[in-house]
Amino acid sequence: MSLYSAIKSRQGGPRGATSLVLLVTLAVFINYIDRGNLATAAPLIQDELHLRATELGILMSAFYYGYVPCMPLMGWLAERFGTHKIFAAAVAVWSIATLLTGFAGSFVALLGLRILLGIGESAAFPCASKVIANTVEVSRLGMANGVMSFGYLLGPAVGTLIGGYLMTVIGWRAVFIIFGSVSLLWLIPWSLAASTLKTTTAAIEGIAPTFRDILKQRALWGASIGHFASNYGYYFIISWLPFYLVKARGFSIHSMAEIASYAYLLNALSAFGMGWLADRWIQRGRNPTVIYKSIMGITHLVGIGCMAGMVLLPEKPSIAALFIFEIVSGCSYTGLFAIPQILAGPQATARWVGVQNAAGNVAGIIAPLITGILVDQTGHFELAFDLAAAINLLGFVGWVFIMPAVRPINWQAHLSRLSR
């Protein structure tokens, strides 16, 4: 089944829906390249600016100081003023922040630019999820989110491989300048697609719940806890894997870039494949609740063993554990956003994802910082991997036991009960 046939518009034709899904996929692809460049450049930046591991951890966490608190706001802005406007402004902000990072000469300058980058990128998933919820049928959400997941998971693979190579040739500063400039080009096709998006959005009707109504949903908090645990493992790996491979395992920058990029590529392919498979199961009559809860729960259980294997096993088995983790965790990324799109529906997806993704990305603040502190205090990564393994248990509880059935919330009936 092709992407063109898999993605069908709720209100327009499949061509417009496909174009919009591909555009938001390209946006999150760029998003993850720009946010991940710091991790690839971390060994070079540390040597040039004489930073401690704790300071690197702060810089990696700083992105989330702007990213996390702004996501609910961006979800509200997208539904209030239009996704096309908010998304365009956000991409412009994060592209300029990436470009200016190439000129930063101190820890403080890097800190400020990482926070600005986070503010810009905080609009990405609320806006992208709003676009998908508005344009894609529920039975096709797995494929659409699989495509989007492929985009943002491929971003680190491409960014690490190309960025790592270019940094050895032209230096880390030039790479940030080039990548930030190229990111701005996305605004051209987005401006051409804006009319389609405005028409589709205007066609979505229904009662819109308030933030208070959304926050009362048990499903939101189960998904948010699960999202946090999923993100902790992801951000722990994406933030510290390059540094770990170079400093703890002794790989060169070039070898590190190859290993990390292959791992990220497996992650992306796995997400794409599971999105297709989830849709096939649902279209054949399988229960979405069973499908998505099983996927999310199994991912966390396998993740525990993989985290232990990465740090305890010899070199080759350790890399194998990394690759297994990337494959299994990739299976869960389709559910991260398909689940809230199903639950919240077009009327509330942007705000729901804004809240859920904000809660989930608290892990982006905690994981890099705690890892840096643990490495400075102990001189090795064992405790950091132990903690990442333990947090998988929290995710299992959130997705499997706290979150109820995965089915659309009848907001009209829910709000009618509240008004009685």
Image: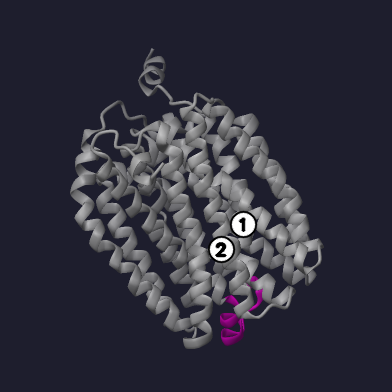
Q: Which residue is mark 1?
A: 366
Give the percent coordinates (x, y) of residue 117: 42, 65
**Main SS of residues in magenta:** helix
- Image quadrant in which the N terminus is located: top left
Left or right? Give the position of 273 relative to 381.
left
Q: Nearer the viewer, residue 56 or 344?
A: 344
User: In percent of the image, x 44 and y 42: which residue is there?
Assistant: 143
**Residue 354 appears anywhere in the view:** no
User: In percent of the image, x 52 and y 65: which residue is there?
Assistant: 157
User: In percent of the image, x 68 and y 54: which residue is there?
Assistant: 324
Q: Which residues are magenta?
A: 42-54
Q: Nearer the viewer, residue 20 or 220?
A: 20
Give the percent coordinates (x, y) of residue 264: 56, 61
User: In percent of the image, x 31 and y 39: which residue is there?
Assistant: 135
Q: Nearer the viewer, residue 144 or 297?
A: 144
Q: Nearer the viewer, residue 22 or 249?
A: 22
Label 1: few (<14), some or many (≥20) within 10 Å? Answer: some
**Residue 17 appears anywhere in the view:** yes
Q: Which residue is mark 2?
A: 61
Left or right? Give the position of 196 relative to 331.
left
Are the residues at dot 2 and dot 1 in contact (C-beta closer than 8 Å)?
Answer: yes
Q: Amino acid at mark 2?
A: Ser
Colour pattern: one colour
Label 1 secondary element? helix
N-terminal of the two: label 2 or label 1?
2
- Image quadrant in which the C terminus is located: top left
